[in-house]
Image: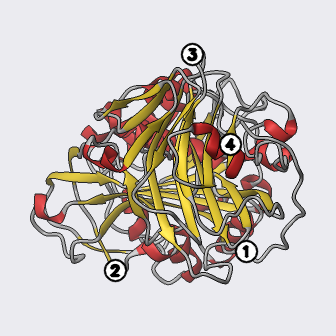
Amino acid sequence: MRRRARLMTATAAAALLIGCATGPAASTPGPDHGKEGERVLVFSKTAGFRHDSIPTGIATVKELGAANGFAVDATEDAAAFTDTNLAKYDAVIWLSTTGDVLNAGQQTAFEKYIRGGGAYVGVHAAADTEYDWPFYGRLAGAYFQSHPAIQPAKIHVEDHAHPATAHLGTGTWDRTDEWYNYRANPRDKARVLASLDESSYTGGTMSGDHPIAWCQSSVEGGAGRSFYTGGGHTKESYAEPAFRQHLLGGIRWAVGAAQADCRPERGYTPVFDGTAASLEGWQQAGPGSFTLNESEGTLTSVGGMGMLWYDRRELGSYSLKVDWKMAGDDNSGIFVGFPASDDPWSAVNNGYEIQIDATDAPEKTTGSVYGFKSADLKKRDKALNPPGEWNTYEIRVEGERLRIYLNGVQINDFTNTDPARSLRQGHIGIQNHGDADEVSFRDIRVKDLPATGSGPSAPSDSPAPSGSGAGR
């Protein structure tokens, strides 16, 4: 069985805190072979154009593995695609593969591997592969169509919480590569992590919506994961620290060492986008404050106990998404469903707090409706990234029902039955808890939902009965 040990790396944590010749059939396993921990297979067979960057890419993955605790094997032998052999690996990295590289039996084994919880990482020309295998097309997310000459371009980062893009800050990511155009846009089925600014270079053909990196969870309705990046054509790419971190983050997420929300995301309106201008709709209630870092796009809590709340409008049925990160054993929360007030205790007494504090009592810990209902702690613990890494909440309010998703996993389902409170209309806010607590927030966005119904991105789970208690 594939191992799912949690992998923590000093390199990744630090990054989050800062703003060809044919190879042998298979490499000899390294000294870590057989130890507990993640293992990946780099597959680089080509039946079409061959990139001279492949050896550099393989060497880079091995370097990343040695520095970050996962083992790496490499092969160009399609005979490696058997049930028994694939079961050794937490992910298979298709590194600039091209053309038809697997036979029918090998394809069946790989499909079984993915549906059983395996992971796919596609790099660059992995999108120029297996055009006659529909499963692979869905797994990769999009097929290659064409490309202009190698040139600089600007990349817009759309997801600042995923470990593949969390290190890139709020500005554009400027880099040089061979920029693929794709036959279809993957946005409806994948979470787009980064997209090209087609006005910044020549030869883009995707009408201004040009994804270049994306991820998918629950591939084919199973437990598999898929990450793809269009970068990596040039040898020089693999010497770029930002691209290496991008690739490392994609691998860490694919093997389950880091968590992220990879459900498709459309229709959200930013209410805090990392700029000072977007704070014009927010007010501080009570003591303490938040520090804005525009280069990283973050608000970080200072002192307390107070709250920064969004005063532009009350919300009814909606999906609220918030990226957040703790520095250590810290405390904060997100308030929903409270009336306008300069007193932060109004939110405590009239609304509900979605807690951020992984070491408190069950009904007062991360994912709980504070004082009312604990999260499903097993699901929460599996979905939660540790201090120093970003997490994403989706807080979904429909009528008096409140559902909480952590990194795409539903961990709580609560229904208000208190006549003194109502989730049907109210404001949202983020808490600054106290002098010893440091929690950062970024990319706060909202999507209005129909007044009734569960909405397209949430399952129709039965609401659980509410508890009782007092939030803080």
Q: Which residue is mark 3?
A: 435
Q: CA distance from mark 4 to mark 1?
A: 29 Å
Mark on residue 183?
Answer: 2
Mark on residue 348?
Answer: 4
- Based on the displayed image, in which of its 4 quarters is residue 133 positioned? bottom right
Q: Residue 213 appears at what percent x and percent y?
A: 40, 58
| SS at badge 1 | loop
| SS at badge 4 | helix
Q: Which residue is mark 1?
A: 459
Left or right: 170 with respect to 416?
A: left
Q: Earlier in the sequence, mark 4 or mark 1?
A: 4
Q: List the single residue furthest toward the left.
A: 202
Q: Earlier in the sequence, mark 4 or mark 2?
A: 2
Q: Amino acid at mark 1?
A: Pro
> Can residue 40 be seen at all in this image of the molecule?
no
- Based on the displayed image, in which of its 4 quarters is residue 49 positioned? bottom left
